[in-house]
Amino acid sequence: MRGVDKTSGSLFSYVNLEDRIPARHPLRKIRHVVNNALVSLDIDITTLYADFGRARADEVDTH
């Protein structure tokens, strides 16, 4: 998913996944690698969006 990496633990789960996944678990490294890859691809992905129409989900202000 693109955009800010926010957690919404109370939305779908009663447990905090950050507390459940050990600090040295491989998923933490995978998350870091994937987030970096998505950041590096952001410009390429952004060019695929039209300059008109509805905003991307990560650009919508929810406040």
Image (tube, grey):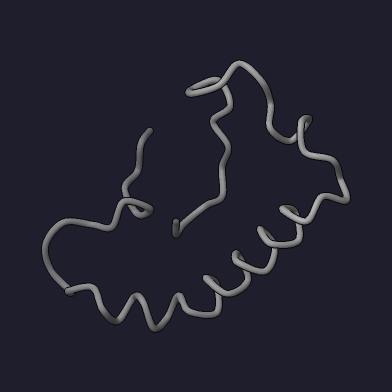
Location of the C terminus by quadrant is top left
Q: Relative to the observer, which residue lies in front, 63 or 9? A: 9
Q: Quadrant of residue 45?
A: bottom left
**Residue 54, how many percent across, how many down?**
16, 56
Residue drawn at (26%, 78%), measured in percent from left and top? 48
Q: Relative to the observer, which residue lies in front, 47 or 29? A: 29
Q: In the picture shown, does residue 45 fall above or below 6?
A: below
**How many marks do you count on the picture?**
0
Location of the N terminus by quadrant is bottom left
Q: Say left or right for 62 vs 30.
A: left
**The furthest residue to the right:** 24
**The furthest residue to the left:** 53
**The furthest residue to the front:** 26
Q: In the picture shown, does residue 52 fall above or below 23?
A: below
Q: In the picture shown, does residue 13 fall above or below 28?
A: above
Q: Quadrant of residue 62?
A: top left
Q: Relative to the observer, which residue lies in front, 12 or 44? A: 12
Residue drawn at (12%, 68%), measured in percent from left and top? 52
Q: Say left or right for 12 vs 21.
A: left
Residue drawn at (66%, 20%), measured in percent from left and top? 15
Q: In the picture shown, does residue 57 fall above or below 9?
A: below
Q: Relative to the observer, which residue lies in front, 30 or 44? A: 30
**Residue 26, how many percent across, how many down?**
78, 56
**Residue 38, how many percent across, how many down?**
52, 70
Q: Say left or right for 51 vs 24.
A: left
Q: Quadrant of residue 40?
A: bottom right
